[in-house]
Image (cartoon, rainbow, N blue to C red):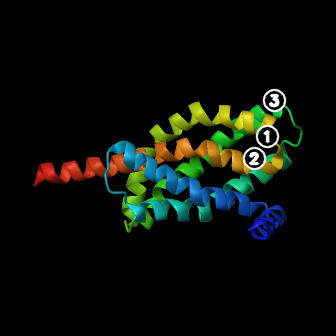
Amino acid sequence: MPNVWSRVAAFTHKYPLSRGMLSYACIWPLGSCVQQKIQGKEKLDYWRALRFSLYGCCFVAPTLYTWMTIAGYLFPKPGLRSGIYKAVVEQFTYGPIAICCFYSGMTLLEGGSKEDAINETREKFLPTWQTAVCVWPFVQTVNFRFIPEKNQIPFVSLCSFLWTVFLAYMKQRSQEVDSKEEIGTS
């Protein structure tokens, strides 16, 4: 087993993006499952968790890695001031795009139409972004200021666990509202 672990460690060191992908492939579905349990579901929707895993691993990790690389290039100096700049710029560049991609991407992964994806994004973007603006600048300032660059993606992955629970709640909330409206009109 130690040999396997050393190979995994060597691989993730050689390919740093893989650390984020592995983190998000585990943390995002866990966030979905925790949200389902908080919601009171006795039987977990594992297909939903799988969609969260695929989305976190294949979309969020690579785009976040790219953003972190660009941010490091644009703001190369370590320190509080640079961390604050990175966090603010992220909230007005990467953040809105990530939120739009989450709602539209997850809707499409659920089998929804392009129109469903657009409608859900319109409905959920603003409240989600307003919450993000209250949370992520603080988290990212800490990340950019105190966390070594090689560990920034895993750190953000851990912080995003709670964010993922929130996103899963927001995503589910719209589905519950839609279901109740359909029942009420029948």
Quadrant of the rendering where the C terminus is positioned: bottom left
The residue labelled by disc 2 is: 152
Residue located farthest toward the right when viewing the structure as drawn: 77
Q: Estimate the spatial distance between the alpha carbons at disc 3 and disc 2, rounded to whole Å.
A: 15 Å
Residue at left offset 32%, top offset 57% = 43
Residue type at mark 1 is: Ile
Residue 39, percent across and down?
34, 44
Of residues 91 and 64, the one drawn nearer to the viewer in this rendering: 64
The residue labelled by disc 3 is: 80
Residue 59, percent across and down?
60, 62
Residue type at mark 3 is: Leu
**Residue 75 appearing in the image:** yes
For marks 3 and 1 on the same chain, the one whose residue lies earlier in the sequence: 3
Residues tagged 2 and 1 counted as in contact (Cβ below 8 A): yes
Q: Quadrant of residue 132?
A: top right
The residue labelled by disc 1 is: 147
